[in-house]
Image (cartoon, coloured by chain):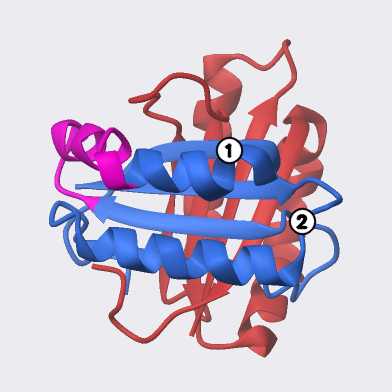
Chain colours: A red, B blue
């Protein structure tokens, strides 16, 4: 399985309402993309100093499923309507994980 | 529960051997830190264009456990001997997750 993690730092003009709208859009999107085994998103809790503004963690079966997720029209739509203009910086990584290893 | 995700972009001089040594050090460290419910680390698979060089995903029970992990002497030792000099850029986020939600 593949763990895809992404973190975002927002542009200064991004508001809490924008972030709430993004979270709703991503939640609605995830429901349309069955290859997503697990999907955790949200604003950074900032439990530690520094850090990015927002995080996504997605688990998919394999590289093909990752492409199916990231190239899905519903994902592209969220980029066009929300993420695209909000992002100042993005950092993403894919890691191999064994099923059930993250609990 | 808390999902802590971190991604790192390395300085140019970092070698594959340095990364392998870091991975071993983090693996040894995790064995000494019982608050880590789950711990997934490794170089980015680069299944998609761009992205950071390395990722960490850790699940802990709560904020206190996160501090116990990040402030643990064994974690600080890895920073001093490996991460500290390797990092060009770091992005970290903490997200609330329900037990078993990431599988």
Residue identified by numbered label 1:
B84
Q: In the figure, is residue A20 to the left or right of A18? A: left
With respect to residue A51, does B94 lie above or below? below
User: How many numbered tags mark residues here?
Assistant: 2
Q: Chain of mark 1?
A: B
Percent across and percent down for residue A32 are 54, 69
Q: Which sits in the foreground, B82 or A1?
A: B82
Q: Which sits in the foreground, A87 or B81?
A: B81
Quadrant showing the C terminus of chain B: bottom left
Q: In the figure, is residue B30 to the left or right of A39? A: left
With respect to residue B15, does B10 lie above or below? above
Give the magenta-colored segment's residue range.
B60-74
Please say whether residue A86 is visible from this viewpoint: yes
Q: Does dot 1 land on a helix, a strand or a loop?
A: helix
Residue A3's tag is none
Q: Around disc 2, counting alpha carbons within 10 Å, would you say few (fewer than 14), some (14 to 19), or many (20 or more)? A: few
Label whose residue precedes the other's in the sequence (1 or 2): 2
Q: Choose top left, top right, bottom left or bottom right for residue B16.
A: bottom right
Q: Choose top left, top right, bottom left or bottom right for residue B17.
A: bottom right
Residue identified by numbered label 2:
B14
Residue drawn at x 62%, y 84% is A65
Residue drawn at x 79%, y 45% is B11
Q: Does dot 2 land on a helix, a strand or a loop?
A: loop
Does B70 lie within the magenta span?
Answer: yes
Does A86 lie within the magenta span?
Answer: no
Q: Are marks 1 and 2 in contact (CB under 8 Å)?
A: no
Residue drawn at x 15%, y 51% is B35
Q: Choose top left, top right, bottom left or bottom right for residue B26.
A: bottom left
Percent across and percent down for residue A15 are 60, 14
Percent across and percent down for residue B31 are 23, 66
Callouts 1 and 2 in the same chain:
yes
């Amino acid at each position: 399985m593949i763990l895809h993690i992404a973190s975002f730092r927002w542009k200064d003009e991004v508001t809490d309402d924008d972030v709430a709208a993004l979270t709703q859009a991503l939640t609605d999107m995830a429901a349309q993309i069955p290859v997503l085994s697990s999907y955790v998103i949200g604003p950074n809790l900032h439990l530690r100093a520094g850090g990015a503004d927002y995080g996504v963690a997605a688990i998919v079966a394999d590289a093909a499923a990752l492409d199916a997720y990231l190239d899905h029209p519903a994902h592209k739509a969220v980029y066009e309507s929300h993420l695209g203009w909000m992002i100042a910086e993005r950092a993403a990584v894919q890691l191999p994980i064994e099923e059930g290893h993250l609990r």
